[in-house]
Amino acid sequence: MTAGNGSTASSFDVVVVGAGFAGLYALHRLRGMGLSVRVFEDGGGVGGTWYWNRYPGARCDTESLQYSYQFSEELQQDWHWSERYATQPEIERYLNHVADRFDLRRDIKLNTRVDSLVFDEAAGRWTVGTSEGGTTSAAFCVMATGCLSSPMTPKIEGLESFAGPTYHTARWPHEKVDFTGQRVGVLGTGSSAMQAVPLIAEEAAHLTVFQRTANYAVPAWNGPLDAGYLQWFKANYAENRRRAKRLVSGFLCYYNPQSALEVSQEERDREYEKRWREGGIGYLGAFSDITTNDDANRTAADFVHRKIRSIVKDPALAELLIPNSVIGCKRLCVHAGYYATFNRDNVTLVDMKSNPIERITPNGVIVAGREYRFDSLVLATGFDAMTGALNKIDIRGRGGDRLRDKWADGPRAHLGLVTAGFPNLFIVAGPGSPSVLTNMVPTIEQNVDFIAGCIAHTRAQGFDAVEPAVAAEDAWVAFNDEVAHGTLRYGCSSWYLGSNVPGKKRVFMPFVGGLPAYIQRCEEIVRAGYEGFIFSRARRGNTR
Ligand code: NAP
């Protein structure tokens, strides 16, 4: 049996791990270069994040017209997004459409988890071990494993003893979960919880939300896409995409160049009010120094505090829902009726700031000596972000060295894409790339295009292997750390820093310098003949 290019079915030019936005585009792009490609996907369908996160209310917080591929003009013209922010089912349908439209399924193996990746130095190839039991050989591996794909289940005494069903938002069942008439507990108040809580509250007899840290959220004001706007956007898609790439976040938004501190309070509030009414994470673009200056940040935070007080009728409850941290330090949430949900008679907030959960019993949760009883428990407790999915795989590079050991003191990857000692291993949206701080889809496309170019260059020069020089990697990691320290990002506990995972080294993982600076650096490196990359021949060990 042969695959593309005449390779045997268990030997490919490239193995891609994951079939979400990144894996699907990597397959399409690399196959288009004439390479034989095999994608392994743990899930029972394509979609990645949008396959697993099926909880009530799950939808994207980036506008649908922009949170979509741009590699095919026909695709972006043909596909019809129905709402400003797409729901999980709509994005999953879109990704299934992409898989069919570009005939991707024939090279994707679903329900197959990659457990190990071992680099054979003599052969200059990776041996890929999967849950199927067999091994596959590949010259190159592309890790399209996702930034937020390794769910965190907290270690709380008694969790296993809970008698009712327990659901994690990131592993939600495919069939509808009906909470009608039930008492439900939700643990966590991040983006996932904020989307799920209003809908669960409408269905359940009673909902108890357990909050350890209050979180900032701005409204989405979601709704059907305006026909005129849709028409304009599609007529100018290419130009809109170009403009978006010149903005730090990679999505269209007006970034006000003024400081929040150089205008009067009235002017500031007018700008915040305008952004609040527009909805979405563009709120943080209201002034240039919100994420870098404490005083400026406080003005943006105070405005949200006032909004929460105006929405939540019980003043004491409002105070519990008001975060006391830097706004934008944790990921800013986008919600639809989250704060107003706490005005309902069937919703209770349990503040755990000073009283963590003591234990979970068969009937519910004990906090501060009191048992809260319910029928179902929802864990909206987040992810081991950016490194979790990679570290779950036993990845061994040169000399048998393990990636998880190399990264024990924080991830190290040049441009977030490649890591020294692990030749021919590429990471899409890896730690050190802009990824989660930007519109993920264009960033993924840029990463995949870079990887495709690097593989093409390696082969065209007659080399078998490519990896970054340690000095180039060290310089990039140090640069990212320096840029991150110039922001307010270290001012809270967040998954960006890994501080939600017990024992994880506290390092700011995504590249915080913005998409244009990142693209510029990638382009400079390519123009300089892949400066900072080492190319070699496997058997002869010939390097340059
Ligand atoms: P998250 O933001 O990490 O929130 C997890 C929540 O669980 C936090 O409130 C956390 O409290 C709490 N928690 C965790 N362990 C706990 C424990 N042992 N005891 C008590 N509370 C505990 O996770 P998420 O809500 O799943 O969101 C993760 C990211 O996914 C988002 O930031 C966003 O980037 C992405 N996402 C996006 C969308 C969207 O596009 N709209 C939707 C969902 C998710 P602490 O804050 O105190 O740690």
Image (cartoon, helix red, strand yellow):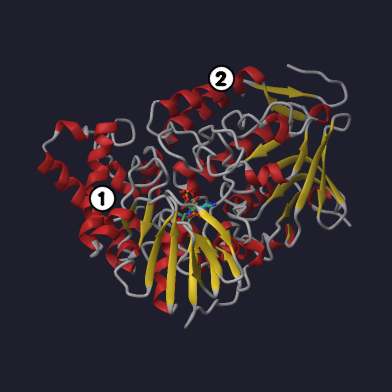
The image quadrant of residue 533 is: top right
For label 2, the crowd category at 10 Å Cα-Cα, with few meaning under 14, some 14 to 19 and many 20 or more, is: some
Q: Earlier in the sequence, mark 1 or mark 2?
A: 1
State the residue at coordinates (66%, 66%).
161
Please say whether residue 86 is visible from this viewpoint: no
Question: Mark number for residue 68?
Answer: none
Q: Nearer the viewer, mark 1 or mark 2?
A: 1
Q: Residue at x 47, y 42 (%)?
A: 494
Q: Nearer the viewer, residue 237 or 316?
A: 316
Q: Kindly state the secondary structure of the residue where label 1 is placed.
A: helix
At horizontal 64% and vertical 39% (from top left) the residue drawn is 427
Quickly name the residue at label 1: 304
Disc 1 residue type? Val
From the viewer's perspective, is residue 530 above or below residue 170? Answer: above
360 lies above or below 353 = below
Q: Position of residue 96 (x, y in %)?
A: 59, 65
Counting from the top left corner in percent of width and height, residue 136 is at 84, 48
Q: Is residue 228 left or right of residue 333?
A: left
Mark 2 is on which residue type? Answer: Ala
The residue that label 2 is drawn on is 475
Which of the pair 183/112 is nearer the observer? 183
